[in-house]
Image (cartoon, rainbow, N blue to C red):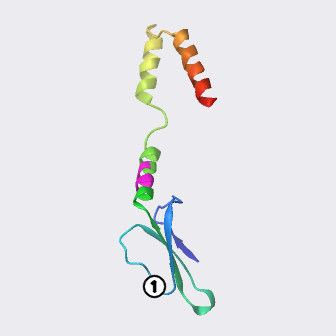
């Protein structure tokens, strides 16, 4: 069995099954082919526009860094220069808001 996903990883999809035929719509698709007992068949998955957009957004997220190094370097410099001040009330408020959100 050959599986060609063309970089598709979203489960939000419309499915078309056919024997000895392939859909001709221009949407992204992943074809799965197998040949049981001498017969050929093609399974095809077509993603909705929303699923395609989600895939593009996921690719952008994966390409972005996990840490904002510019911000980290600013904070390091402020600490080294003695200009970084901790506001305990702001931290306490943020923790309380986080607790409220988590319920």
- Vertical placement of residue 7 versus 63, above or below: below
- Vertical placement of residue 60 versus 68, above or below: below
Q: Position of residue 34 (x, y in %)?
A: 57, 81
Residue at position x 59%, y 92% from top?
Answer: 38
Q: Secondary structure at mark 1?
A: loop
Residue furthest to the left in view is 26
Quadrant housing the C terminus = top right
Q: Main secondary structure of the magenta part?
A: helix
Q: Position of residue 10 (x, y in %)?
A: 51, 58
Left or right position of 67 against 99:
left
Q: Which residue is mark 1?
A: 21
Q: Position of residue 73 (x, y in %)?
A: 43, 23
Residue furthest to the bottom in view is 38
Residue at position x 54%, y 10% from top?
Answer: 89
Camera-side residue of 100 and 24: 100
Quadrant housing the N terminus = bottom right
Magenta stretch encompasses residue 95: no
Count of labels in the image: 1
Camera-side residue of 39 and 18: 18
Residue furthest to the top in view is 82
Residue at position x 58%, y 25% from top?
Answer: 98
Q: Which residues are magenta?
A: 53-57
Q: Position of residue 16 (x, y in %)?
A: 49, 75
Magenta stretch encompasses residue 54: yes
Query: Local crowd at mark 1 within 10 Å, few (<14), some, or many (≥20)?
Result: few
- Vertical placement of residue 91 versus 51, above or below: above
């Amino acid at each position: 069995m050959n599986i060609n996903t063309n970089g598709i990883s979203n489960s939000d999809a419309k499915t078309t099954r056919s024997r000895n035929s392939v859909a001709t719509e221009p949407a992204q698709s992943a074809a799965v082919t197998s040949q049981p007992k001498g017969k050929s068949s093609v399974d095809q998955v077509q993603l909705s526009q929303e699923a395609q957009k989600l895939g593009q957004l996921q690719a952008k997220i994966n390409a972005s860094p996990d840490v904002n190094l510019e911000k980290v370097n600013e904070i390091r410099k402020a600490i080294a220069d003695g200009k970084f001040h901790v506001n305990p009330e702001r931290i306490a408020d943020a923790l309380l808001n986080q607790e409220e959100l988590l319920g």
